[in-house]
């Protein structure tokens, strides 16, 4: 029995990384309105196992809304979303299970303010995955070590810098051993000197084979690790291409305009 727990705690983050390249996230003809506002227009997107997609586009183009539909924090009007081949359940246990497969890291760190760093990371594995406390703590310490904040485990979130808190948020998401990680502008709320410590963790994850969907304005990150850059504007996906193609040869005027604005300062 104690042997089993040992194995459980040392389970790698991605148990079957690199085994195949099946689609893990598939959006087909997804439509969404907020009242009169048509916020997602015929969105078709596939993220395959091990792929890193970077989503860019002007503010208000629907990037966050799209991310939120993927673990059903937002409903859609029509179309289809599948995670690892399974349609998104409407509610209940099945939905909770699916959410556990999609890790999400937002712009704001969203740690539980009244729990220690360690408790923040062990909470969901214990509650949702029914991991025993010791195994969850071993896993949490391993993950906190990977993101470089193991020494902060017994502190409260407010005692950590923004960059440290965001790295804890990443460890917390990884503790559920998700199949896919979604990042929605994870460095936008950080002081500039803390951006790289968070991006470094994301680069490492990408290199380890994690499947990732990242909304970010960090173009250096996009160039370094993205398999595909997805450009959104006005609720539509206007371009999907390799980083080199996107940055060197944007096809649409919207993308050219967007790039000229972000790359010229
Ligand atoms: N809960 C909401 N209710 C109404 N409108 C919303 C809501 N959330 C976002 N929007 C609007 O939807 C559009 C897309 O927003 P969002 O997905 O946040 O874009 P992005 O992340 O690309 O900046 C914006 O015009 C925004 O104001
Ligand atoms: Mg957004």
Image (cartoon, rainbow, N blue to C red):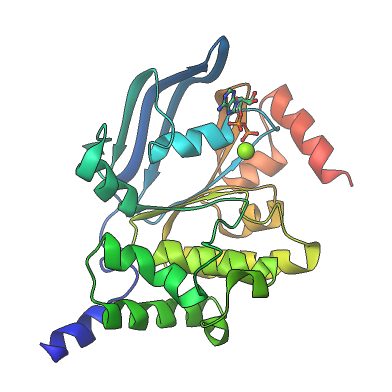
In the rendered image, which quarter is residue 92 located in?
Answer: top left
In the rendered image, residue 75, in percent from the top left (x then y), is placed at: 39, 27
Q: Residue furthest right?
A: 265
Of 170 and 196, nearer the camera is 170
Q: Is residue 78 above or below residue 203?
A: above
Horizontal side of residue 226 vs 76, given as left or right: right
Q: Is residue 252 above or below residue 135?
A: above
Of 92 and 263, nearer the camera is 92
Q: Residue furthest bottom?
A: 2
Name the residue rendered at 67%, 56% in the picture: 187
Instruction: Let me know if residue 203 appears in the view.
Output: no
Name the residue rendered at 55%, 56% in the picture: 110
Of 189 and 81, nearer the camera is 189
Horizontal side of residue 261 vs 226, given as left or right: right
In the rendered image, residue 195, in percent from the top left (x then y), is placed at: 71, 64
Q: Residue furthest left?
A: 1
Horizontal side of residue 217 vs 78, given as left or right: right
Name the residue rendered at 26%, 35% in the picture: 91
Q: Is residue 70 above or below residue 198?
A: above
Name the residue rendered at 34%, 83% in the picture: 138
In the rendered image, residue 90, in percent from the top left (x then y), is placed at: 26, 31
Of 86 and 69, nearer the camera is 69
Horizontal side of residue 127 vs 36, given as left or right: left
Count up the numbered dots: 0
Q: Quadrant of ligand 2?
A: top right
In the rendered image, residue 163, in percent from the top left (x then y), is placed at: 67, 68
Instruction: Let me know if residue 56 appears in the view.
Output: yes
Classify the position of the N terminus by image quarter: bottom left
Q: Residue furthest top?
A: 36
Q: Is residue 132 above or below residue 170?
A: below
């Amino acid at each position: 029995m104690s042997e089993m727990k040992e194995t459980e705690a040392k389970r790698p983050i991605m148990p079957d990384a690199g085994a195949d390249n099946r689609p893990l996230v598939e959006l087909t003809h997804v439509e969404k309105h907020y009242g009169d506002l048509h916020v997602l227009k015929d969105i078709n997107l596939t993220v395959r196992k091990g792929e890193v997609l970077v989503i860019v586009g002007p503010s208000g183009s629907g990037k966050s809304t799209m991310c939120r539909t993927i673990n059903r924090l937002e409903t859609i009007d029509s179309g289809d979303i599948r995670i690892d081949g399974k349609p998104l359940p409407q509610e209940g246990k099945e939905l909770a299970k699916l959410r556990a497969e999609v890790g999400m890291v937002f712009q704001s760190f969203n740690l539980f303010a009244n729990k220690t760093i360690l408790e923040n990371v062990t909470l969901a594995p214990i509650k949702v995955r029914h991991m025993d406390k010791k195994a969850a703590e071993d896993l949490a310490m391993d993950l906190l070590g990977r993101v470089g904040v193991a020494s902060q485990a017994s502190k409260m979130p407010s005692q950590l810098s923004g960059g440290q808190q965001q790295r804890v948020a990443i460890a917390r998401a990884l503790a559920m051993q998700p199949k896919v990680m979604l990042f929605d502008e994870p460095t936008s709320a950080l002081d500039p000197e803390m951006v790289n410590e968070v991006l470094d963790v994301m680069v490492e994850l990408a290199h380890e084979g994690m499947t990732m969907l990242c909304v970010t304005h960090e173009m250096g990150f996009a160039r370094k690790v993205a398999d595909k850059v997805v450009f959104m504007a006005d609720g539509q996906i206007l371009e999907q291409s390799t980083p080199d193609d996107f940055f060197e040869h944007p096809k649409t005027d919207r993308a050219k305009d967007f790039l000229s604005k972000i790359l010229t300062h």
